């Protein structure tokens, strides 16, 4: 196995310039009869798909450990007991559904543009998702958990929001998949399709993040748990950064990009 | 930690006064000079207060009470330094400065002020003295740098005193937190227990222990960073004297 496999090679024409993209062709580069390339080792790489999978399987499993109240988490008398509140198993189903959906999308739906990332990132990404999952699951499945203030009404409303946003998120991922054909790497502007969940493209550049925020807001309302709120806020900040970046690159790439669109929240952000 | 921002703004400060980068304007420089002069004066007040109280009482014990108010005022005032970085008139990292100032403010308010029983501990005096000497040197360093008239003595002091003051301050801080632990546990200070409507809990006692543990990776890094800075900044003088 060669040590410097292609994914970890970074080649540039100018040591301080941008790295060359995978699809660039030698004949089309601004070089003469000889060409000088500057090589940089990007370090051990891991594919994005693999990272997403490990990132998602963690929370899925970890939450269940807390849900079933495995030993050493709560006091011994609560081992393997169940909560008497209806919202607790509902929350478990929602959380698990969210991560199972993400795993299915990673395996079958996403067409990921960057093929790899540095190996180091897996520790950063996984600890973020895994630690937050443990923190949230600990409180929701705690024997002393307090169900939402407005009871069943609150849970039902929150569940509706959550499901709506999960459907929305899936619709967006499918719409984005249909934009990219596996052979050509041409970027296209996403537009609303027949699916009503995609109509939000008229107002937002990255509705996948909008729906993700909505899902977690629903989950926060459902569980009325501060750690969940915290996770939602941190995730929102990160997704806003990503959405703004994506929005900017759309604007740069396409002169005819619709001006009505905002990065993540219609008209606001 | 006892020597905040020592590693961050010094080279940047001398850079901004020597190079014509897009640094602060004249109004900003005037404001910063006033700020640094006021802070130098403030910490001098604390130093004088400590000495006077010691001479009056004849012992090291309980000197905290004699300088409690100016200590709180001037240490909390250092929060402005985060604003300076955020606005851009000081070329330091907001995150690094924020971290350093917040750790000082945390010790002043969330430990020493909040747990009355530790206020008479000698460990408090240890870090207060370390902070006082450090800050007097640091703020006068900035003042002179901004005015482009930095006496070598101040530069030397800034990059040498920390060798003793930094470990001294850290020792004082750790001993104080450690002394506070039993009282925090007994009274449940700043702690939230289950059950509650927001399904959240926080144990301040455990948190303080984690803070103490965090010194282990952080302190050596900051300390050796300062040692490297010292070689870089004070090293030049040795080269010049060799040339002669």
Image (spheres, grey):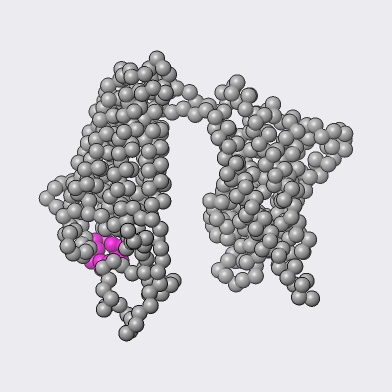
Residue A74: quarter of image: top left
Is residue A252 highlighted in magenta? yes
Q: Could you tell me if residue A246 is visible in this image?
A: no
State whether residue B23 is above or below residue A62: below
- Which quadrant of the figure contains the N terminus of chain B? top right
Q: Where is residue B70 in the image (x, y as percent from the top left)?
A: 72, 41
Taking depth in this image into account, of B31 and A213 the one nearest to the observer is A213
Residue found farthest to the top: A77
The stretch in magenta equals A248-259
State whether residue A111 is above or below residue B170: below
Q: Which residue is drawn at 60% across and 72% down?
A: B20
Residue found farthest to the left: A194
- Which quadrant of the figure contains the C terminus of chain B? bottom right
Taking depth in this image into account, of A110 and B6 the one nearest to the observer is A110
Q: Could you tell me if residue A77 is visible in this image?
A: yes
Taking depth in this image into account, of B45 and B175 the one nearest to the observer is B175
Taking depth in this image into account, of A106 and A233 the one nearest to the observer is A106
Q: Residue at x 24, y 61 (%)?
A: A258
Q: Position of residue A92 (x, y in %)?
A: 28, 29
Q: Residue at x 74, y 55 (%)?
A: B160
């Amino acid at each position: 196995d060669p040590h410097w496999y292609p994914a970890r090679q970074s080649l540039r024409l100018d040591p301080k310039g941008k790295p060359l993209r995978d699809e660039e062709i030698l004949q089309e580069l601004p070089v003469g009869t000889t060409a000088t390339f500057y090589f940089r080792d990007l370090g051990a790489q891991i594919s994005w798909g693999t990272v997403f999978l490990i990132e998602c399987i963690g929370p899925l499993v970890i939450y269940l450990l807390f849900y079933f109240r495995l030993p050493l988490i709560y006091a011994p008398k609560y081992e393997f007991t169940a909560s008497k509140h209806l919202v607790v198993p509902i929350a478990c189903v929602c959380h698990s559904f969210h991560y199972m959906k993400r795993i299915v999308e990673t395996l079958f739906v996403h067409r990921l543009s960057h093929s790899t990332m540095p190996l180091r990132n897996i520790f950063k990404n996984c600890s973020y998702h895994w630690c937050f999952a443990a923190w949230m699951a600990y409180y929701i499945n705690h024997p002393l958990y307090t169900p939402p203030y407005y009871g069943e009404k609150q849970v039902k409303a929150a569940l509706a929001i959550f499901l709506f946003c999960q459907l929305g998120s899936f619709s967006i991922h499918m719409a984005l998949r249909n934009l990219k054909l596996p052979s050509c790497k041409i970027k296209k502007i996403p537009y609303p399709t027949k699916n009503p969940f995609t109509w939000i493209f008229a107002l937002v550049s990255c509705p996948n993040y909008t729906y993700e925020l909505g899902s977690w807001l629903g989950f926060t309302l459902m569980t009325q748990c501060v750690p969940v709120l915290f996770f939602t806020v941190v995730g929102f900040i990160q997704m806003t950064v990503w959405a703004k970046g994506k929005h900017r690159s759309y604007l740069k790439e396409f002169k005819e990009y619709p001006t009505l669109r905002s990065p993540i929240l219609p008209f606001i952000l | 930690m006892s020597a905040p921002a020592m590693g961050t703004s010094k080279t940047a400060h001398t850079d901004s006064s020597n190079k014509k980068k897009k640094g602060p304007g004249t109004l900003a420089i005037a404001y910063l000079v006033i700020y640094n002069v006021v802070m130098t004066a403030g910490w001098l007040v604390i130093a004088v207060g400590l000495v006077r109280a010691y001479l009056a009482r004849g012992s090291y014990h309980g000197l905290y009470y004699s300088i409690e108010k100016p200590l709180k005022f001037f240490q909390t005032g250092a929060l402005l330094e985060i604003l300076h970085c955020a606005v851009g008139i000081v070329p330091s990292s907001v995150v690094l400065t924020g971290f350093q100032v917040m750790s000082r403010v945390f010790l002043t308010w969330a430990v020493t002020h909040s747990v009355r029983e530790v206020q008479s501990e000698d460990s408090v005096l240890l870090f207060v003295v370390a902070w006082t000497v450090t800050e007097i040197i640091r703020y006068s360093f900035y003042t002179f740098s901004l005015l482009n008239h930095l006496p070598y003595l101040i530069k030397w002091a800034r990059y040498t005193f920390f060798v003793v003051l930094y470990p001294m301050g850290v020792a004082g801080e750790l001993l104080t937190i450690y002394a506070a632990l039993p009282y925090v546990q007994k009274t449940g200070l700043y702690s939230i227990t289950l059950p509650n409507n927001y399904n959240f809990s926080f144990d301040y006692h455990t948190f303080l222990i984690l803070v103490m543990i965090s010194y282990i990776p952080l302190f050596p890094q900051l300390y050796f960073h300062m040692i490297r800075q010292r070689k870089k900044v004070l090293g030049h003088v040795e080269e010049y004297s060799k040339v002669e």
